[in-house]
Amino acid sequence: NAGVTQTPKFRVLKTGQSMTLLCAQDMNHEYMYWYRQDPGMGLRLIHYSVGEGTTAKGEVPDGYNVSRLKKQNFLLGLESAAPSQTSVYFCASSEMQGYTFGSGTRLTVV
Amino acid sequence: KNEVEQSPQNLTAQEGEFITINCSYSVGISALHWLQQHPGGGIVSLFMLSSGKKKHGRLIATINIQEKHSSLHITASHPRDSAVYICAVMGADGLTFGKGTHLIIQP
């Protein structure tokens, strides 16, 4: 089915470890986003991309890096995970018609 | 930064009831989204609207641009409607999300 696919769905990391979350979309959307969702808060934008080869910082970018080497993929990296990065991460893509979200990645940093 | 407020935060109702969830925002926008998130699940876009009213099945969304207010209505509510409903507004700095309304429909 067309849409946004996130991998992995779940992950437990130890403090200081690194990992990469992958987001893939097959709708040829230009815009892609990474959000985090924490209890009692609305989704917050980490980084976004307006096209292949471009990235920009969102509201809460510290501790994260991103890359958009191919139009269909948007990668979110944690170089040195911290407990404060325990969250549910959502990727989304958009065009004029609206947004499509992935199913989320639940990350726990211990 | 736009401030997005949703009410109520939590709502429990009986099957068949008419449900209204409200969203207000502080700064003018180009569009407003209503999203649905089931427990432990992903986020699904229900509506995107910039004026007037949209209907899809038992769901109706309205927006009043002058009053900076939108409502999501569910007619003939059903237990499968139990979810978190999120309002998000599109402004100059992208989407700003409300904290969500947690809806439980009891059989």
Image (cartoon, rainbow, N blue to C red):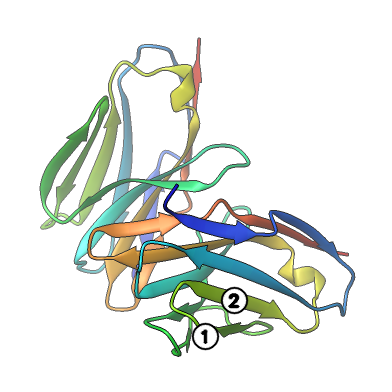
Q: Is residue A1 left or right of residue A23?
A: left
Q: Quadrant of the N terminus of chain B?
A: bottom left
Dot 2 amino acid type: Leu
Q: Residues within 10 Å of mark 1 (few under 14, many from 20)?
A: some
**x and y percent of residue A34 in the render?**
53, 70
Dot 1 amino acid type: Leu
Nearest the camera: A94 or B80? A94
Q: Is residue B37 left or right of residue B17?
A: right
Which one is in front in this view, the residue at disc 2 or the one at disc 1?
1
Give the residue displayed 47% in from the left and 22% down from the top. B80
Nearest the camera: B89 or A21? A21
Report in which chain the residue with disc 2 lies: A
Considering only vertical position in the picture, is B95 above or below B76?
below
Q: Is residue A85 left or right of residue B103?
A: right
Considering only vertical position in the picture, is A12 above or below A70?
above
Q: How many marks?
A: 2
Give the residue displayed 17% in from the left and 48% down from the top. B63
Give the residue displayed 48% in from the left and 52% down from the top. B99
Q: Which residue is mark 1?
A: A69
Q: Residues within 10 Å of mark 2 (few under 14, many from 20)?
A: some
Give the quadrant of residue A3: bottom left
Q: Secondary structure at mark 1?
A: loop
* Whether labels 2 and 1 share one chain: yes
Q: Earlier in the sequence, mark 2 or mark 1?
A: 1
Q: Which mark is residue A75?
A: 2
**x and y percent of residue B26 in the render?**
28, 65
**x and y percent of residue A82 in the render?**
80, 75
